[in-house]
Amino acid sequence: MLNQISVFVENKAGRLASVMKILTDNNIDIRAMTIADTTDFGIVRFVVKNYEDALKILKDNECTANVTKVVAFSVPDTPGGMYSVIDAFENAGINIEYCYSLVTNKEGRASVAVRVDDNDKAVQVLNDKGIALITVDDI
Amino acid sequence: MIKYFKPEIECAPRHELEALQSFRLSQQIRRVYDNVKPYREKMDAMGVKPEDIKSVKDLSKLPFTVKQDLRDNYPYGMFATPTSDVVRIHASSGTTGKQTVVGYTRKDIDIWAECAARALASVGGDQNDFVHVSYGYGLFTGGLGMHYGAEKLGATAIPASAGNSQRQLEMFRDFGSTIVCMTPSYAVSLIELMKEIGMSKDELKLKAGVFGAEPWTEEMRQQIEEGLGIKAYDIYGLSEIMGPSVSCECEYQCGMHICEDHFIPEIIDPDTLEVLPEGEQGELVFTCITKEALPLIRYRTRDIATLVYEPCKCGRTHARMLKPQGRTDDMLIIRGVNVFPSQIESALLSVDNKATNYLLVVDRVNNLDTIEVQLEIRDDMFGDNVKDVEAYKKKLKSAIDSAIGVGVSIKLLEPKSLARSMGKATRCIDNRKIKNKFTK
């Protein structure tokens, strides 16, 4: 599983840039990112190599940030690759809250991070299907 | 053990206290009539002569005083003594208009110090205490008022004044401060800072605090008591009457005992100006019966409060005023509904007791009044999900809406977006007023 960082940002010009600048100034490479937005605020979620450093740097810069575990895996980069996993999740009664793609070193494969309501069950489903989890070493 | 500074007066039987008030009032009215032109004119216009005022019961025959009277006679026109007898000047912050100037004779300063000493004793203070005063020293009455009280009590005064928060905490620890005097919002920001720098309340010897100069809620009291490991007491005062310690809570925390041998309280209906019976809520009015330099008569404080004359468990007989519910000039009229910012704070803290840093922004959009409650987000308020944050906002909104009867909107801000205050915190910005000022 990967440790995802979530940062609260007000929905106004320049806020996302200022968070990105903090990471840039500290030489932190973002491996995946997604933004959930509402009319007045957003939550920026991303994955980095060393989440503890990134979290500390963000907090030192007075950002509100949290860590959440997400399940990440890769599937063959062909039609139906993703469907087979999502279908298996559904059959196991696992609810997906959100999902986004990742940059990894696995060529020819599509990699995704998913936030589910039951991580252990999701890992079990992936194990049963013989799909290896993506760890921090793969990103 | 209950402590008093002057038990013979603080616990005097009511009939003796009232006799003293009547005597002092009649003498004061004579002095004021002879020496203060604006009062002489007001009384003449109403056909009231000094000799008509014989007892406390005659109080309602006298004219009221409002802040505008002080502005109209700025700076010294309401003084009853020549300035050669005035040993000190203070001034109001001028947040609600032009600043007003108040003066004190040597005797006034002495009486004020005694009132403050009574307040400190009523929260358990004595000569063994270190009284840490974090109100600003200067034209504001908070700092010097409590300072003189601490010295009068024989305690050790620490004149820390406001500001440099980290240093305040170090002084708490190193000097062994036992009683603090500051605004409640400053106490909350110091508690925040203690967490940030990893200071524990166990390192401190604080046992009590007197908090005033701005309205605060029971929820905030709990938070301060927990955060500093103390008992937190409410103190009340205003420069026009004296300064802090016109009234202060005792150990039972059931209303603030007014120093009635110096200030006679009344509660009036702010619209009809009728005196209201005991227990009813209305505007608080004070008459100074011992003040020499600036003896204001029936001064309308704009604070909304209730008076209780029942004897208190602590043995004090002086009337208690229940926590001001806001000010008549703080009161917001939102879509025709009267709303006090303190009601919003109370609802906010009932849902989230850490939500002490907030700002109310009132505006008029398309001829409709709006209130936006701005609140800083904290790590423990959100995870990675928008829906958790939305659920939190919804919970706050419904608590506030039902408390005030008007719909508000909630806006979450990034940390440290709102200004931290060393003194009185700005809790409300009414953008409608600014527009009126320019369009008039």
Image (cartoon, coloured by chain):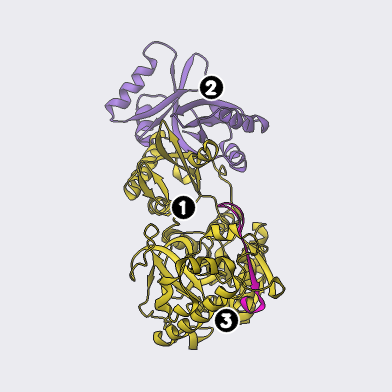
The chain that hosts pointer 1 is B
Q: Callout 1: few (<14), some (14-19), or many (20+) C-alpha neighbours within 10 Å?
A: some
Q: Residue furthest top?
A: A79
Location of mark 2 (residue): A104
Image vertical order of residue B359 relative to residue B232, above or below: above
- Asked whether the viewer can see residue B232, the reply is no
Q: CA distance from mark 3 to mark 2?
A: 70 Å
Q: Nearer the viewer, mark 1 or mark 2?
A: 1
| Image side of residue B182 versus residue B358, left or right | right
- Chain identifier matching the yellow colour in the rendered picture: B
Image location of residue B67, percent across then percent down: 54, 59
Image vertical order of residue B185 relative to residue A49, above or below: below
Magenta residues span: B92-108
Question: Both on one chain, marks 1 and 3?
Answer: yes
Image location of residue B62, percent across then percent down: 45, 70
Q: In terms of depth relative to the viewer, which is nearer, B130 or A130? A: B130
- Chain identifier matching the purple colour in the rendered picture: A
Image vertical order of residue B110 relative to residue A16, above or below: below
Location of mark 3 (residue): B126
Image location of residue B281, percent across then percent down: 36, 63
* Three-letter code, disc 3: Asp
Q: CA distance from mark 1 to mark 3?
A: 36 Å
Query: Looking at the rendering, which quadrant does residue B438 occupy?
Result: top right
* Residue at (36, 64) in percent of width and height: B274
| Image side of residue B410 versus residue B246, left or right | left
Location of mark 1 (residue): B330
